[in-house]
Each structure stands twice: as C-alpha cells, then as structure tokens.
Image: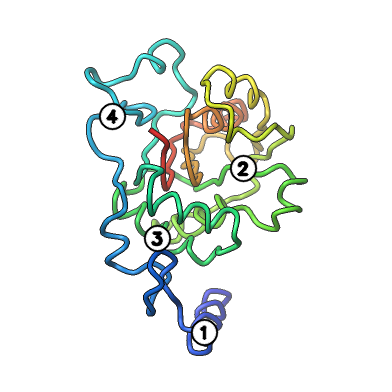
C-alpha cells in the first residue's frame, strides 16, 4: 500500500512540478538518458576485491597486504564530471529523488551480487539528525526493490562518530579513523549474506570497517555496491 501511495504522490508532484535533469536541466526526468549515457564508467582492469585500477594481477597490492573484511566492491562510475555532481546533489542538496535513477544505473552496470539482505552504510545519529536523511539508505532501498530483496537499515549502526574523511586521503589514516566505528546486530545479520551499499568509495576504509562490524555480528559474507568510486 505504501508503494502505491508513493507512486501516486510522485505522479501528482510531477504534474505540478515537471522533473528536470539534474545535470543539463532538460525537462522530463531527474536524469535524462543523454546525460546518463556519458557518465564516466568505472571500467578497465580493476582489483577483484576493492575495484581499484590495477596494472596486472587480479588483486591490488593493498588487498594482498591487508585483506579487507568485505569480499568485493563493485562501483558503477568514477567520481568525476556528472557522477560527482549527482553524488553532491543527492548527498548535500537534499535531492533524494535522484536515488531512484542512480540506483537503477548501479543495478544496470554492476548487477546485484547474491545476497539475503541489502544494508546501507549508516550515519552516526548526530549526523543523521543534522542532515535529515541518509543518502546511502536512499540508494539501498531502491537497489533492494530492484533486486527483490529486503532492505534493513538497522542491521548495522555507527557506534562512534568519526571525523569526516573527505580531506583525509591516506589509506592508513582513513582505516584508523573508522576502525571499530560500526556494530552489526546479530539478530538481523547472523548467517546472512549482506549487500552493503554506499554512495561513494575512496579507499574502502569505511566499507571495510562496516563489513568488519557485520562479520563480527555473525554475517556470512559482505559484498559492496556503490554508485561511484574515487580512482
């Protein structure tokens, strides 16, 4: 029933305020086909674990030296040009309706790994209150709907607020900042295959720490999907 109400509300709003492409302003859709077609794809040879570009071999040096808790990351786009603008609009400008076309592109480009439940990377409660929403949860709900899977935003929580990682680029520093920051709920994740969703991955430190919290709570496996990644 809630989905029917949501679709009806969206249709009514579209009649009153026709959607415009967030990138070019063309009317008709929040992300037009022409702009979606030229988003910078995360293509080429990439590490099978973290999806960073590699010159040779299946796994990058970082994943060989310090294997992450997650089994894999798949990202649809590189954090450049239009992809960067979409992430910014979703994450900081409150345009949560962009989550629907962005999630559709992730599913189309990356597919959906075998999983029992989709889980978004959580915000700390204080940051969630100040922002008003979790952009990763918005993406996760729509990816779950497309895949016919349940979405559980309470399967893992951020138990310690951490400094923003935007200006901390070194991998070891990022890992130290988020280490131990997440705790999974055993009642929700024990024995289950988790698909962990975030908007962007840079070094993978946040996804690694979140996956570690889920595995410590008894999750069977954690695989990750993101809209974009920073190469």
Image depth: mark 4 or mark 2 in front: 4
What number is the disc on residue 17?
1
- Relative depth, front residue between 134 and 82: 82
Cα–Cα gap, marks 3 and 2: 21 Å
Distance in Å between CA atoms under marks 4 and 1: 42 Å
The quarter holding residue 13 reads bottom right
Q: Residue 28: x percent and y percent?
A: 37, 79
Classed neighbour count for the residue bearing mark 4: other residues with Cα under 10 Å, few (<14), some (14–19), many (≥20): some
The residue under label 3 is 146
Residue 46 disc label: 4
- For image coordinates 37% across by 26% down, the residue present is 49
Q: In which quarter of the image is the C terminus?
A: top left
Classify 10 Å Cα crowding around label 1: few (below 14), some (14-19), many (20 and above).
few
Looking at the rendered image, the disc whose residue lies closer to the viewer, 1 or 2, is 1
Marks 1 and 3 sit apart, C-alpha to C-alpha, by 26 Å
User: Circle 4 — which element?
Assistant: loop
Dot 3 falls on a residue whose secondary structure is helix
Residue plotted at (63% across, 40% down): 156
Tell me the quarter of the image containing the N terminus: bottom right
Dot 1: what SS? loop
Marks 3/4 in contact by CB < 8 Å: the verdict is no
Which of discs 3 and 4 lies nearer the camera? The answer is 4
């Amino acid at each position: 029933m809630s989905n029917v109400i949501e679709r009806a509300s969206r249709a009514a709003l579209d009649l009153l305020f026709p959607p415009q492409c967030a990138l070019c302003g063309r009317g008709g859709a929040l992300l037009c086909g022409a702009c979606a077609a030229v988003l910078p794809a995360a293509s080429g040879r990439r590490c099978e674990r973290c999806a960073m570009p590699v010159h040779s071999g299946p796994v990058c040096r970082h994943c060989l030296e310090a294997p992450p808790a997650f089994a894999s990351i798949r990202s649809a786009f590189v954090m450049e040009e239009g992809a960067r603008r979409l992430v910014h609009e979703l994450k900081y400008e409150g345009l949560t309706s962009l989550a629907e076309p962005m999630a559709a592109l992730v599913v189309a480009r990356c597919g959906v790994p075998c999983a029992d439940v989709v889980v978004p990377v959580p915000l700390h409660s204080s940051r969630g209150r100040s922002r008003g929403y979790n952009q990763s949860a918005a993406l996760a709900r729509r990816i779950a709907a497309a895949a016919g899977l349940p979405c559980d935003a309470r399967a893992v929580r951020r138990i310690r607020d951490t400094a923003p990682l935007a200006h901390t680029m070194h991998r070891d520093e990022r890992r130290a900042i988020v280490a131990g920051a997440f705790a999974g709920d055993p009642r929700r994740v024990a024995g289950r295959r988790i698909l962990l969703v975030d908007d962007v991955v840079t070094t993978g430190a946040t996804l690694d720490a979140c996956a570690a919290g889920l595995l410590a709570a008894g999750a069977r496996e954690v695989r990750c999907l993101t809209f974009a990644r920073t190469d």
